[in-house]
Image (spheres, rainbow, N blue to C red):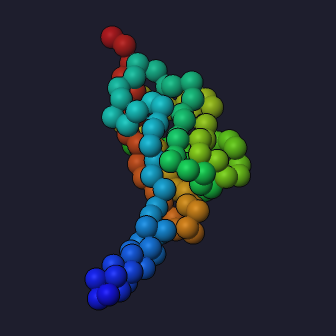
Amino acid sequence: MKLKVLTLVAALISLPVAASAHTPLIATVPQSGEVLTESPPEIVLTFAEPVRLTSLVSKHANGQKRLKFSPAGESDSFTAVSPDLPAGRNELRWKALSPDGHVVEGVIIVNIRKAP
């Protein structure tokens, strides 16, 4: 009897933790750390489940700019077309609102090196 009660209590305690897990970014195109010879035609972010992407900013030594992406609502995949990333190290900083209401964020590094 005590074992059943302890098992039930342990299961109930673990439920909020499992329910509040944040949605991870599972794939990007280009991949973080990739070295390209020119700006990619698009940037794609794919999440494990639908989120609301709230911000996608390209940071470079010369400054930063907001990138336009679609769709505007909830989705598990977002695309920024023609980001026009300059040569050098580019940090693509994103923020999203996960289904549990928490803000998740991350950085993707894309290096552009002009071909010799």
Q: Residue furthest left?
A: 3
* Left or right of 44 in this view: 73: right
Residues 106 and 18: in front is: 18
Residues 5 and 53: in front is: 5
Q: Can you see residue 105?
A: yes
Q: Determine whether 63 is above or below 82 in the image.
A: below
* Left or right of 70 in this view: 89: left
Q: Which residue appears at 61% of the width and 37% of the height?
A: 79
Q: Determine whether 85 is above or below 106 in the image.
A: above
Q: Can you see residue 66?
A: no
Residues 39 and 25: in front is: 25
Q: Residue furthest top?
A: 116
Q: Can you give x and y, in whole percent of width and height, for residue 100 in the image?
A: 55, 67
Q: Which residue appears at 58% of the width and 62% of the height?
A: 99
- Position of the C terminus, as image quadrant, is top left
Q: Residue furthest front?
A: 1
Q: Can you give x and y, in whole percent of width and height, for residue 75 in the image?
A: 64, 47
Q: Can you give x and y, in whole percent of width and height, for residue 50 in the image?
A: 60, 51
Q: Which residue appears at 46% of the width and 47% of the height?
A: 25
Q: Residue furthest bottom?
A: 2
Q: Determine whether 16 is above or below 94 in the image.
A: below
Q: Which residue appears at 49% of the width and 25% of the height?
A: 39
Residues 3 and 87: in front is: 3
Res. 33 image quadrant: top left
- Position of the N terminus, as image quadrant, is bottom left
* Left or right of 87 in this view: 68: right
User: How many numbered circles are shown?
Assistant: 0
